[in-house]
Image (spheres, rainbow, N blue to C red):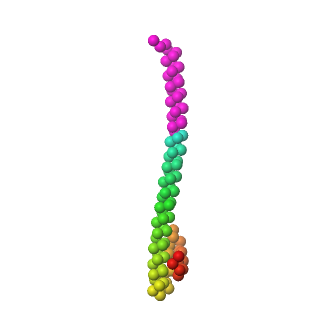
Amino acid sequence: MTDLSTVRDVALGIVVGAVVLAVVVALVVKWIVGKLVLVVVLGALAAVVWWQRASVVDCAHGVHHRLAEGQTDGTTCRFFGRDVTVGSSPD
């Protein structure tokens, strides 16, 4: 049979261990969630920039097509709301 002081000491050890484990898990989860949020934000930024890039490239091809036909107007495209002048070279 176990005496009261042994049970009390074991219970106290388990409580302290559980609190320490909870703090460690909270720190690890915070670290993981922070990294996941950063990955999602950077992925979203990359996707938006890629989408804008594709849009400006399509616009530039249209400008080059119009310039090849002899039109001189409409030589600007928009990239994140800013005007970008498109030259006559297809680069």
Which of 9/90 is in front? 90
Q: Main secondary structure of the magenta part?
A: helix
**In the image, is residue 12 part of the stretch drawn in magenta?**
yes
Which residue is found at the position 52% from the left and 23% from the top? 12
In this view, the residue farthest toward the bottom is 70
Which residue is found at the position 51% from the left and 56% from the top? 42
Q: Which residue range is magenta in the image?
A: 1-26
Is residue 72 positioned above or below 2 on the image?
below
Total count of labels: 0
The image position of residue 74, as x and y in percent, is: 48, 81
Which of 89/33 is in front? 89
The image position of residue 65, as x and y in percent, is: 45, 81
The image position of residue 49, as x and y in percent, is: 50, 64
Is residue 63 positioned above or below 5 on the image?
below
Is residue 68 positioned above or below 14 on the image?
below
Which residue is found at the position 51% from the left and 68% from the top? 80
Location of the N terminus by quadrant is top left
Which residue is found at the position 53% from the left and 24% from the top? 13
